[in-house]
Amino acid sequence: MKPDMTSTYPFYIQIRNDLLQKIQTGIWKEGDLIPSEMSLTETYGVSRVTIRAAIKELVNDRYLIRRPGFGTVVYQNKESLSNFTLVRSFTNEMREMGLLSKTLEAELELISADDKLAEIFAIKEGEKIYNLRRVRGDTVPILYSNTYLLPVTDITPEVLKGSLYEFLAKKQVFFDHFEEKISAVKAPKDITAKLKIYYDAPQLKRTRYSYDERDRLIEYTETFYNSLLYEYRTSISYRKK
């Protein structure tokens, strides 16, 4: 495909759309290394700057991921991600329900791993690790999350208000796979107080383990949800290879 000279769309947008079509139709599958910038320059007959702009669009939209020293690979297209609520952030879950996601309280510390955290992350006791604690919701608290994160990148106060995963993506930190445990528990009093829960009933607890492509645990999070305000939903579809 060569860019349409008569189109009102800039060349980089036309190329971005063509590259996206290759991903969505399965020509390029998840994990595939896409052609080099030089190769794409020859294919589309445009400058390298234009190709880079097109690729940047798809990286920002999480269809592609840059691997320094390796190249650019297909990450996961949005259609495949949208079918699995398990791997979505709270920000995206709130968007699904048509609600705004707000951080009502937040604390960030660099702490020393105790024996429990050292065992979970397979690190030495006393090693530094980030601890992010937040109360999030819309106009009222919906969840309390306690996140522990290896220092794979600098965590700044910017992360306190928005999506953790969107923040990490900007830092080129991506996860390869997740494990989760869902249970109904009696939340500790300090957490029910933060969530303004004044009734005695089990609450939803989600424990998430997030791994990189080397199967290294990067994030461990315990999240408590107000069971009157949050409904756990997931939709799973079978996709033939």
Image (spheres, rainbow, N blue to C red):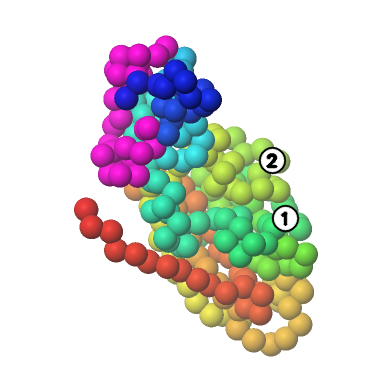
Q: Position of residue 34 (x, y in %)?
A: 30, 30
The question of residue 27 being in magenta is answered with yes
Report the front residue among 160 and 57.
57
Please indicate, yes or no, whether residue 188 appears anywhere in the rendered image: no
Q: Residue at x 50, y 56 (%)?
A: 88
Would residue 214 be found to the left or right of residue 166 on screen? left
C-alpha distance separating marks 2 and 1: 12 Å
Q: Which amino acid type corresponds to the residue marked 2 in the rendered image? A: Glu
Image-quadrant location for residue 185: bottom right
Q: Is residue 19 left or right of residue 101?
A: left
Which image quadrant is residue 23 in?
A: top left
Circle 2 SS class: helix
Q: How many marks?
A: 2
Q: Is residue 29 magenta-colored? A: yes
Can residue 229 be seen from the camera position used here?
yes
Q: Mark 1: give few (<14), some (14-19) or many (20+) Cα within 10 Å.
A: some
The label number, if any, that marks residue 103 in the structure image: 1
Q: Which residues are magenta?
A: 18-47
Crowd rating for badge 2 (residues with CA inside 10 Å; few <14, some 14–19, many 20+): few
Residue extending furthest front?
6
Q: Which mark is residue 158?
A: 2
**Left or right position of 128 against 134:** left
Image x and y of residue 149, in percent: 54, 48
Q: Residue at x 36, y 29 (%)?
A: 72
Nearest the eye: 156 or 150: 156
Q: Amino acid at mark 1?
A: Thr
Which residue, as the protein is rendered here, is positioned at the far bottom?
Answer: 200
